[in-house]
Image (tube, rainbow, N blue to C red):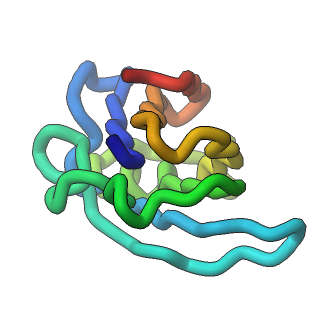
Amino acid sequence: MGLSTHVLDTMHGTPAAGMQVALYETHGEAATLITRLTLNADGRNPDGLLIDHARLRPGTYRLCFEVAAYFRARGVELPEPPFLDVVQLDFGIALADQHYHVPLLVSPWSHATYRGS
């Protein structure tokens, strides 16, 4: 149970190792930083869950993925400004006793997400 994420780089067909991610709790326009992290070799939080079951609360959250910085670090030439810079996903947690997995599939030109398992 809890909240997790996983990022796959669809341009290279690999996990997005080294991508910077920030998680916020949101209240209307206000956002409070919960954690910042760097994804591991598997494209996941090296510490496991972003929020464990005991701390997960119903409410709204935001994940910010630093996509342009990641692709530039991989040697991809991007225009200025890049098409995608920071991908921001706003989502809600209704049932804190369930597991919420928020994966991201991303390239410099597109992204997709869904509620995973």
Which quarter of the rendering shows the N terminus? top left
Q: Which residue of the protein is positioned furthest toward the left in this rendering?
A: 41
Most extreme residue toward the right is: 28
Q: Left or right? Give the position of 2 relative to 115.
A: left
Q: Does residue 117 appear in this view?
A: yes
Residue 13 in percent (x, y) is at 26, 20
Choose top left, top right, bottom left or bottom right for residue 95: top right
Locate residue 4, reporting x and y percent: 36, 45
Residue 12 relative to residue 114: left or right: left
Residue at 39% across / 73% down in the picture?
A: 36
Which residue is drawn at the image coordinates 43% and 32% (left, top)? 103
Position in image of residue 62 (x %, y %): 63, 57
- Residue visible at 80% across and 69% down? 27
Name the residue at 24% across, 42% down: 43
11 lies above or below 39: above
Residue 101 in the figure: left or right of residue 49: right
